[in-house]
Image (cartoon, rainbow, N blue to C red):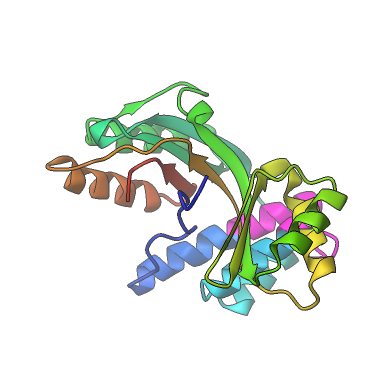
Amino acid sequence: MGRAYQNRKESMAKTSDAKARVYSKYGREIYVCAKAGGIDPDGNLSLRGLIDRAKKDQVPSHVIDKAIDKAKGGGGEDFATARYEGFGPGGCMVIVDCLTDNATRTFNDVRLCFTKNNCKIGTQGSVSHMFDHAAILAFNGDDEDTTLEALMNADVDVSDIECEDGKITIFAPHTDYGKAKQAISDTFAGIEFEVDEIQFIPQNTTAVGGDDIPVLEKFLDMLNDLDDVQNVYHNVEG
């Protein structure tokens, strides 16, 4: 599997408007996660990981607290997940994950991003079968044997482990995220994860060049500017 994965936020906010979008997306995801799995991060490992990622992306504490408080109330918006797939510039494969309170609006907005850039939105499953839906955990360390033993004892179906330059990176099925994180946290006291994510990792990459490069950049920017879009994954090389 190697290093073929991308950080959750490929480009950090450069303007106040961009920061506001990042805060909004994290706030929405934290709210949904807390409402579904409980507001206590100690009992909701997905929420704990999400909060950790938000802090690393410099999301203010009041944004995080507000989202959790809203979930605590039990009311509020009714968001649903939505996933769209298709082909981008140069024939690359694209997956767009959304949280929406209006599926029709979100689909139309995402489809417009595809059509305006001469891209093709596909049916469900049209490209996702070419990605691995994986949990990725990375932390400083070099004890690969102890790491693997802890994961095996926790019945984690490990896909791959990398140990390079004093860092261990674990790849596992997304369904084993909670077990994997708990096993590592229990084994290495005070561990801090540099990467703590669930992502779609491409099985193969596509080279995009020439006139397709600016089109790809515009396409990704348009998708990321949509309030309902949480993550965009692709298989573009590099």
Nearer-the-camera pick, 236 or 108: 236
Q: Position of residue 165 (x, y in %)?
A: 52, 71
Quarter of the image for residue 145 reads: bottom right
Q: Residue furthest left?
A: 211
Q: Is residue 147 left or right of residue 220?
A: right
Q: Is residue 45 magenta?
A: yes
Q: Is residue 195 left or right of residue 92?
A: right
Nearer-the-camera pick, 186 or 145: 145
Nearer-the-camera pick, 38 or 92: 92
| Placement of 90 over or under 210, stated as above or below | above
Q: Position of residue 1 (x, y in %)?
A: 52, 44
**What secondary structure prevails in the magenta region?**
helix
* Magenta part of the chain: 28-46
Residue 34 showing in the rendered view? no
Q: Is residue 104 magenta?
A: no
Residue 21 showing in the rendered view? yes
Residue occupying the point 72% across, 56% down: 46
Q: Position of residue 109 (x, y in %)?
A: 38, 38
Q: Position of residue 89 (x, y in %)?
A: 25, 36
| Placement of 64 over or under 82, stated as above or below | below
Nearer-the-camera pick, 31 or 124: 124
Q: Is residue 154 left or right of residue 165?
A: right
Residue occupying the point 40% across, 60% down: 10
